[in-house]
Image (cartoon, helix red, strand yellow):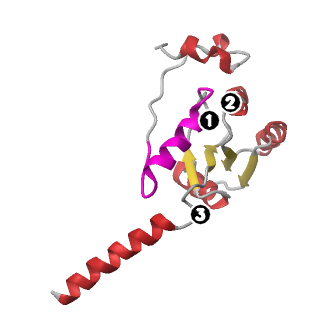
């Protein structure tokens, strides 16, 4: 009984210590990790454009975890990442595509304590990051958040992307 009670107390103390760590409390910095391998550049461009147009004062970084793209694609992707000030983490490998490896590499490269993973073809509403960080501030660790996505119309209807059009497509699909 004494051993069980001590373990429970230690677990409670550990949880309290995690919740009080300054790196989590009040920190509104977010790392967004997007795993890719030879993904359509235009889709990424639209995703980056929607992230660039975020409202609010939340600090965030975007990391492209490129797992095994061919060299010509990686060069094109690097130019796009430079244009949008996105970190491009390239893993040169001939191994088969592994989303989990790409995510783990991107997460390890992240600078901030809060990490969000997403797909390369996502378009974010203009207040998405602000909403995510509001959840973080209100619910604190250890928490996992899931966001609902909607099916977008054909690509030609989205080009060029502008977040002012988000409400137009929010109910699509």
Residue 53: image x %, image y %?
71, 29
Q: Nearer the viewer, residue 91 or 162?
A: 162
Q: Nearer the viewer, mark 2 or mark 3?
A: 3
Label 1 SS: loop
Report crowding for label 3: few under 14, some 14 to 19, many 20 or more residues within 10 A (C-alpha): some
Q: Is residue 148 visible?
A: yes
Label 2 SS: loop
The reply to whether the C-beta atoms of the residues labelled 2 and 1 are less than 8 Å apart is: yes
Q: Which residue is mark 3?
A: 23
Q: Nearer the viewer, mark 2 or mark 1?
A: 1
Report crowding for label 1: few under 14, some 14 to 19, many 20 or more residues within 10 A (C-alpha): many
Q: Is residue 153 visible?
A: no
Label 3 SS: loop
Using the image, determine if residue 20 lies above or below residue 68: below
Using the image, determine if residue 105 lies above or below residue 8: above
In the image, the segment drawn in magenta is 125-145
- Image-based side of 86 in relation to 169, left or right: right
Specify the farthest residue to the bottom.
Answer: 2
- Image-based side of 100 in relation to 59, left or right: left
Q: Which residue is mark 2?
A: 40
Q: Image point 46% across, 14% down: which residue?
A: 173
Q: Image point 53% across, 67% down: which residue?
A: 21
Marks 2 and 3, the one that precedes in the sequence: 3
């Amino acid at each position: 009984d004494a051993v069980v009670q001590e373990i429970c107390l230690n677990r409670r103390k550990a949880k309290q210590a995690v919740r009080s760590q300054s790196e989590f409390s009040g920190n509104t910095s977010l790392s967004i990790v997007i795993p890719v391998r030879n993904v359509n550049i235009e889709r990424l461009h639209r995703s980056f454009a929607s992230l660039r147009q975020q409202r609010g004062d939340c600090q965030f970084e975007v990391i492209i975890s490129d797992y095994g793209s061919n060299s010509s694609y990686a060069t094109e992707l690097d130019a796009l990442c430079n244009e949008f000030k996105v970190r491009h983490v390239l893993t040169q490998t001939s191994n088969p595509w592994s989303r989990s490896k790409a995510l783990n590499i991107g997460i390890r490269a992240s600078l901030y304590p809060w990490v969000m993973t997403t797909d390369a073809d996502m378009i974010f509403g203009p207040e998405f990051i602000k909403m995510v960080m509001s959840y973080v501030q209100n619910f604190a660790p250890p928490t996992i958040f899931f966001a609902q996505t909607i099916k977008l119309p054909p690509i030609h209807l989205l080009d060029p992307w502008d977040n002012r059009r988000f409400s137009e497509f929010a109910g699509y699909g």
